[in-house]
Image (cartoon, coloured by chain):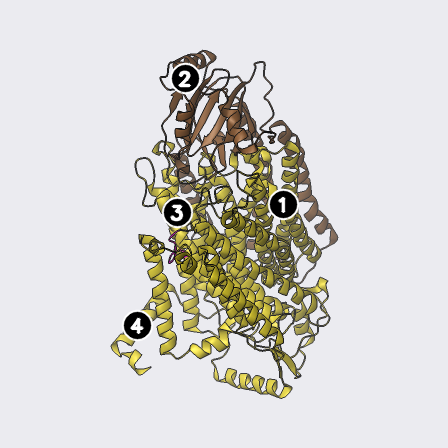
Amino acid sequence: MQHFLIGNLKWSSLPHEWFTIAGTLTFVMLALVVIVVITYTKRWKWLWKEWLTSVDPKKIGIMYFIAGGAMLLRGGLDALMIWLQQSLSSGSSHGYLSSDHFQQIFTAHGNIMVFFVAMAFVFGLINYIVPLQIGARDLASPFMNTLGFWMFIGGIVMVNMFFVFGGQYAATGWLAVQPLAAKQFSPGTGVDYWVWSLMISGIGTTLGAINFIMTILKMRAPGMKLKMMPLFTWGSLCSMVMAVTIFPLLTATLFLVYFDRALGTHFFTTLGGGDPMMYTNLIWMWGHPEVYVLILPAFGVFSEVVSTFSRKPIASYTSAVWGMIGVSSLALSVWLHHFFTMGASADVDAFFGLMTMIIAVPTSVLVFNWIATMYKGKIRFETPMLWFMGFVSVFAIGGISGVMLAVPPADFQLHNSLFLVAHFHSTVIGGVLFGIFCAISYWFPKFTGIRLNQRIGKYAFWCWIVGFCMSFIPMYILGFLGASRRLDHYDSSTGWQPFFIMMLIGGLIIALGVALQLAQILASFIQKNRVSNDPWDGRTLEWAAASPPQFYNFTTIPEVTSRDAYLTMKQQGLPKPTYEDIHMPKSTSVGVYIAGFATLASFGFVWDIMWLVVISMIGILIVFVRRGYDEHSEYVLTAAEIQKLEEARAKKEKELPPVTDNETIEDMGIIELIRVVLSFFLDAIRNKRWRKA
Amino acid sequence: MSGINTKSRSRGWPAWIFILPVIDFVLLIRYLLRGKNVALFNPKGVIAQQQHTLMMFTLGILLAVAIPTLFVLFYFAWKYRESNTKTKHAPESKHGRSLVLRMWLLPVTIMVVLASVMWPATHKLVPQRAIASGTEPLTIQVISLRWKWLFLYPEQQIASVNFVQIPLNRPVTFEMTADETPMSSFWIPNLGGQLYTMTSHVNRLNLMATKAGDYPGSSAEINGMGFAGMKFTARAGSAQNFDNWVQSVKQSPDSLDTTAYNKLLQPSENNPAAFYSSYEPNLYADVILKYTGPGGHTH
């Protein structure tokens, strides 16, 4: 009976170790603060109506950013904990973490950074920018988008749930290597949390990807042929096509893992005819393309930024497009390079080594293309361009080490060493993360209508660059010294400790960079320097929309006649806005409910509480069917209403301070920011402002 | 990037001042590396030597492309910056077809060069390939256990844990499998690259030491709680040295009977080296049969 009611949950599943108690307390406190603030400011209804149930891709994009930013802090803390342990744990000292706990932390670090930081930002960007770039008012299926987003949030909930129930996460590496993740070797619920967190967020990703492919293929503005699409849209399209190809594979693989663990099947076990190498193949067939899913949109961002800031069209548009298509199609045939060391035959190894080298060709073409775009340009070095320069420098290191790893005999030495870890951090930090930062500093004026503080942004950039070199150059060296990854302890005679300490210092410098980025955003909102709709002299359609765009994106859908659509429009004179009736989707809470039920079902699966699973499934079914019969999911926004909205906006804009696009305005420095923030709080305390609110 | 940073230029900092921290960093790393076993640059066996050469060759070719590329990047960034009035900007200018051709041809050429070296090297250095040498290879059977390495010497009928002695200049074939242990990876960086050890699979890794010494070995693949402590020493010495060691192990009071092996099967961490004067002759075959069943496959 007890098992029926609460499954495998026991008293000991509740938090009782320092990190689970601390984690639980942190989450509870955060939730309390949020609840108090929202209740106090009476914003519940606003939050629910304007944000949580919104189907506006721009709002969903912002919510992806917030979730990704929060997870970046969470995953970054994991990184610092890993490095602290490794810098302490030499010789007779065993550091402050048990090996099991250490292994859980690096597993969580990897999962969070890839799935809930990089994916979050990439999906946020695509949500916000792609519809604007192709001149669309909305996505092909706004409902699918909100559903995908909330499934993704369900994944975040599940990946953090272990703090409260169970107290342990998977200790298996971020891809849960088999048979280590089998029930025999990992009996706890940690791996189950891993399975179900990736399961529901992965389904969300599949839904999102299908939606974006449909949107890009079917909803472009009149006149925009495929070969006129902005390169960020191209990168997103390639990335999403790959995501649709591989994420179902991940879902299927996760189901097999679940069957092995819960039903006692033998797909990946060592006994009973299973083979762990089958898992290794399946997971990397998904896992390798996954990193290209992340990086292709970033390549798109860099293409836009280099072109805009050099005031030149991209040197060879066709090469850039074929480069991206090349990367995305080749990405599906290189997975085996992750395990040359399994002992396959020389032909197999050589084939996959060759494919991996070939994929470096389109990637190099893209880099050369960007450099050629700068040739004879008129280059402005705003922060987006700095991130681009940082990206090429760091990504070059990552590319070199990547091709070295692609040579199978060299890989036998470098595989599983810290060299490998340094390699993929160079590509993912240098490529994906810098791409995201580049994109955010580029499109921030579009998101908010205000200028992003360049001064603090430059400090943050240099912290990232210096911190990166301090952390990852020693990591490459440790690889050469023969240090394998994931070590929670090593002999003092190895002489590795100074390098681990350098890595920790580098990590702290990066943490300072992140803090400065938060300060940068805060300072921008304090100063609120208004910018025009087109502060960078942009080339693509998103700059034609207002900043921030109206919820219907464009008053008049633009006619596209060339690649740099907006640039052409500016040269030929902007058309006069005309108003017409448009269909807009209604907000819907169905996504929230379905994802909520899916999360509950996952929780039931993790703890073997079958009544919860059944009820949640029925719940999903009911909500879904009801949605199917809802014939009022859209409404008509009449031309008159739009005209009113536009006029109201124009009137409001006149009351605001004037636009400040010029370079002479002074950005707030870090000291002034501290002064402003301190005086705000001092003032609040002195005058008891919370009473007057 | 110094050229771009106009603010620091206006303060009158010379550009080369930015090179100082880089030099300091390099010197610091050089200092920290003094007297350290930089295993991958310090090969002590034929395989490690060839892998090192291949690695350096690849690195050299790639640097030969990457350094000029980065140089051009920074040069363009400096030369075509907006504030530079001395250069000719041509905004909105377009490029010809020859650029596209060069853009594709350069990486294709590099990859053809690299691949033409990689393909034969991969075949030559595939781990299961026996090393050509005048002497008969020595076979050592390896079983990865939680969390220690068991070495069986079928010719000598001795066994050891976390310590393996090999003769110099004689090829050694490690036949590797695992028992009740998640996938591990057998790695002696000074002697050559790693290979996975898995239950139901037999992987063969051929190595040959050319210089005497004690070399650290470990599991490079995470396999549970005791992963970091799953280390062993590989001692390479002369043939005489090897024979002496075999004789001394034969004197060991311990023998690896079923009870002793079952005890080894129990998970344990940070195990010291242990030596057994004999072992059950069918041990290795039984461990494989346990997972494949009779008629199972190995490769």
Mark 3 residue element:
helix
Mark 2 residue element:
loop
Same chain, marks 3 and 1?
yes
Same chain, marks 3 and 2?
no
The residue lying toward the viewer, choosing from A92 and B142, is B142
Chain identifier matching the yellow colour in the rendered picture? A
The residue to which callout 1 is attached is A360
The residue to which callout 4 is attached is A681
Residue A448 image label:
none
Residue A496 lies in the magenta-colored region: no
Mark 1 residue element:
helix
Residue B72 x/y as whole percent? 59, 48
Q: Nearer the viewer, mark 3 or mark 1?
A: 3
Chain identifier matching the brown colour in the rendered picture? B
Say if residue A660 shows up in the picture.
Answer: no
| Predominant SS along the magenta part | loop
Please give the name of the residue rendered at 53% of the width and 45% of the height, measured from the top-left corner.
Answer: A397
